[in-house]
Image: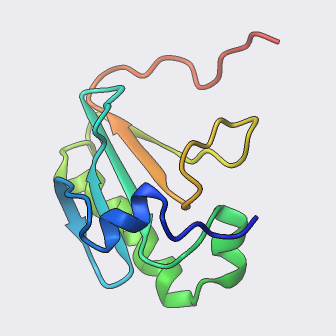
Amino acid sequence: MIYDIDNIFAKILRGEIPCTKVFENDHALAFEDINPMTPVHVLVIPKGEYISMVDFSLAASDIEIVDFNRAIGEVAKIKGLIQTGYRTLANHGIHARQDVFHYHVHVVGGRDLGGMINKER
């Protein structure tokens, strides 16, 4: 798959679409999800053109990887999730229902999140 420079997250990074920023560093941007599934629902995206975790882990520089992971931790701290807990989730590919093919992690919390995976087969 080739990275689509016109995906919604690329447009947010270029400032073409506004977002409610939660945190930003040199290599990552975190912003409120426009369709939150929990009281706290923040998306953390790398600023580089990466489609998935595999793409990111193989092609990103060490500093990009460090800054991205630190951004996730900062979001949890900023949003007050450290004491009560939170979940990070990244969907990769069709079976995981990835909607935007720009690598991103959902940071969700603010309530009991229940079991991890639907056990239906």
Q: Position of residue 3 (x, y in %)?
A: 63, 69
Query: Which of these two is toward me, 73 or 58?
Result: 58
> Based on the displayed image, in which of its 4 quarters is residue 91 positioned?
top right
Which residue appears farthest toward the right when viewing the image?
A: 121
Residue under the image location 48 percent in, 52 percent down: 105
- On the question of residue 85 being in view, the answer is no
Query: Which of these two is toward me, 17 or 98?
Result: 17
Quadrant position of the C terminus in the picture: top right
Q: Please tell me whether residue 13 is drawn above or below residue 31 in the rendered image.
A: below
Q: Position of residue 11 (x, y in %)?
A: 36, 65
Residue under the image location 67 percent in, 83 percent down: 59
> Based on the displayed image, in which of its 4 quarters is residue 12 positioned?
bottom left
Number of dots carrying numbers: 0
Snapshot colouring: rainbow
Apparent side of residue 43 relative to residue 99 in the rendered image (left or right): left
- On the question of residue 71 being in view, the answer is yes
Apparent side of residue 106 relative to residue 78 in the rendered image (left or right): right
> Based on the displayed image, in which of its 4 quarters is residue 111 positioned?
top left
Residue under the image location 21 percent in, 55 percent down: 19
Quadrant position of the N terminus in the picture: bottom right
Q: Position of residue 68 (x, y in %)?
A: 43, 72
Apparent side of residue 40 relative to residue 93 in the rendered image (left or right): left
Q: Position of residue 87 (x, y in %)?
A: 45, 39
